Image (spheres, coloured by chain):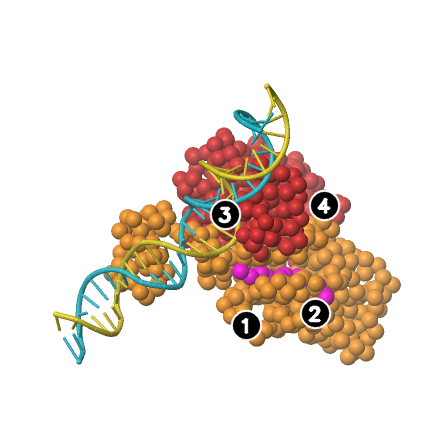
Chain colours: A orange, B red, C cyan, D yellow
Amino acid sequence: MNLKQLSEILGLSQTTVSRALNGYPEVNEDTRVRVQAAAAKHGYRPNSRAKGLATGRSMVIGHVIPSSSRHEMVNPIFGDFVAGAARKYADHGYDLMFTNADDTSIEDAYRSLFQRGAVDGVVLQGPKVNEHRIEVLNRMGVPFIVHGRSTGVEVPYDWIDVNNKRSFLRATRFLVDLGHRRIALINGLEDMDFAQRRRAGYLEALREAGLTPDSDLMRSAEMTEVYGHHETRDMLQLDDPPTAILTSSMISAIGVRRALNEAGLKMGKDVSVIAHDDDLSYLKNGQDVPIFTATRSSVRRAGEMAAEMLIERIKSPNDPVKTRLLEAELVVGGSTGPVPNRH
Amino acid sequence: MNLKQLSEILGLSQTTVSRALNGYPEVNEDTRVRVQAAAAKHGYRPNSRAKGLATGRSMVIGHVIPSSSRHEMVNPIFGDFVAGAARKYADHGYDLMFTNADDTSIEDAYRSLFQRGAVDGVVLQGPKVNEHRIEVLNRMGVPFIVHGRSTGVEVPYDWIDVNNKRSFLRATRFLVDLGHRRIALINGLEDMDFAQRRRAGYLEALREAGLTPDSDLMRSAEMTEVYGHHETRDMLQLDDPPTAILTSSMISAIGVRRALNEAGLKMGKDVSVIAHDDDLSYLKNGQDVPIFTATRSSVRRAGEMAAEMLIERIKSPNDPVKTRLLEAELVVGGSTGPVPNRH
DNA sequence: ACTCATTTTCAAAGCGCTTTGGATGGCATG
DNA sequence: CATGCCATCCAAAGCGCTTTGAAAATGAGT
């Protein structure tokens, strides 16, 4: 069923039917009702490609998931972020399109998506320091929003981010206040912007407390469970092992906990742990009392907000740059406690 | 840069340029080379909407993520499945489109996606028992593939699934062979098809062993970490608590482990645990020796295969129905051991 | 040189929609 | 009654591509 057929059934022109369905004023209310009824009855759905061709808009937002050859990994926070975004897209009549690209062709993926007219805007996830893609997108003139920021990029751009520095600053201070002096940081990949900011917060808190950073206590890699476990076990072997561990994700925190258990150490007593908690739906940080003391910020909510900001940007391309910095809460759970007395 | 402009630059007709770029034979090799060079130089990318309109194909596959009001949850296996699928889509020139729909409108979401001409085929994830959507999709005539199966649906359809029954049968037998008699099952939501099959396998193994199923030991809900923890803690309170626990996901297995630790029980010694492991990239089941004894089947690989099967289906709509049953491996890790001697 | 078959190129129609620039008719106004 | 003004509706152009049917160019064969 297409417009032409529907209009023939109704004995109206395509113009009128189109206008009736799209809410234009120059059509009699009676006919509008009649048209809408017929459309519903026959299950007419305007072809989105044809509509897109005619209007020049695709009503689609693009996301690119990097699936590099090095790290065949899909961050679990991806699911919740996307769910949040997709929900808002749906509210505004947008669909969501993914492209999978490996690290080398990721820029090309964005270019292709936009220049083919497949999407009206894109979301850039997981920006690195000096993120090249931001300038590329800027130059292309595609509306976009960055989930995160990128230190070193000078051009203005829309972004939404968690105040990573502040939240790790606060978390570290919290540990310092509990008497900890040997505080480890199990961070995400070094070149990710968020990891840099978290480290900066961590280092600032150490400096405030007059503590010297120890490179043995600073680890960074993809934040898997296995990684959290591995690094923790490794650090526990040190001559002067950490009494507290900060980690950048709930997933690796679970690995940390596993390593502590294996070593016969009690979390929150022998070793304190603070995790960053993205408030994932399948991996809630406990039910009432949080399992881990954590810096919490819902990535799903971030997805929703990113979507809304992007849609606004598409609507008004010339508005001044919009940015949004979310503060993470520091929730206290059972994984932290005063530094144990050494014999 | 569109076709018309490019053809004018080249002094050729749009027809020839189009054909040259799309590899049709009726064009001189010299001109083809010339056209391709010019296209590359000017960064010409055919508008996908226009192309779709002309060809009647959209080169897009649709996925619908249910984000019901009841369970605001995105299954983490979703990410890996999609990553696998998207990779294969990309190989074949397809894009991937998401729509977010709540439980009540999910059927409508599929209908809309296809009838608007937005997608050439769809993937149905997480089928329930008597999955209504399958018949809907069948009647609509949209090419589709089901990740999983649906007991009670009589119409033929393409699917790819893990042999859930067999894998839980084997896992349960394994526990029985270790001497366990009180074996609990922490399963997914009752109405999910996979959950039914896993239970069927579990029950069959119990029957084989002459054990009577105990409804106190069979739990089912959304497979979160918190849920695994909650049910385990609950069952440990029983007069006759389980000595072994089967669980449908690594995520809830982590909750199980947490509950065991809290109760001062040693996993693999006091209580054995077997989990189903989807081999998620961020949640590997240990590095060399598996943490959990598990029934393992890569959901990413399933995504890849689903994508390929769907693309074949789109190419040849009249081929006989294709199905694919994957066997999960039973990998032995540290979470299982002989039943402890009761005093 | 001329025909005929091939190869190569092209003009134009069509995909299903929106939108511009009228047409048409009814109604109040002078 | 003629005029002008809305309120409604419509025909046709255009979005950027593919594809059909035909024309032009080339080459082989006589």
The residue sitting at 28% across, 54% down in the picture is A12
* Of the two numbered discs 1 and 2 in the rendering, the one whose residue sits closer to the viewer: 1
Q: Looking at the picture, how far across and down is residue A77, in whole percent?
A: 62, 58
* Of the two numbered discs 1 and 4 in the rendering, the one whose residue sits closer to the viewer: 1
Q: Do labels 1 and 3 share a chain?
A: no
The image's mark for residue B290 is: 4
Amino acid type at mark 3: Gly
For the C terminus of chain A, the quadrant is bottom right
**Residue behind mark 1:** A318
The image quarter containing residue B25 is top right
* Of the two numbered discs 2 and 3 in the rendering, the one whose residue sits closer to the viewer: 3
Amino acid type at mark 4: Pro
Label 3 to label 4: alpha-carbon separation: 48 Å
The reply to whether discs 3 and 4 touch (Cβ–Cβ < 8 Å) is no
Q: Are marks 2 and 3 on the same chain?
A: no
**Residue behind mark 2:** A153
- The magenta-colored residue range is A120-130
The reply to whether discs 1 and 3 touch (Cβ–Cβ < 8 Å) is no
Tag 2, which chain? A
Amino acid type at mark 1: Asn
Callout 2 secondary element: loop
Q: Total of numbered circles in the picture?
A: 4
B273 vs C19: above or below: above
Magenta stretch contains residue B16: no
Tag 1, which chain? A
Magenta stretch contains residue A122: yes
The image quarter containing residue A112 is bottom right
The image's mark for residue B52 is: 3
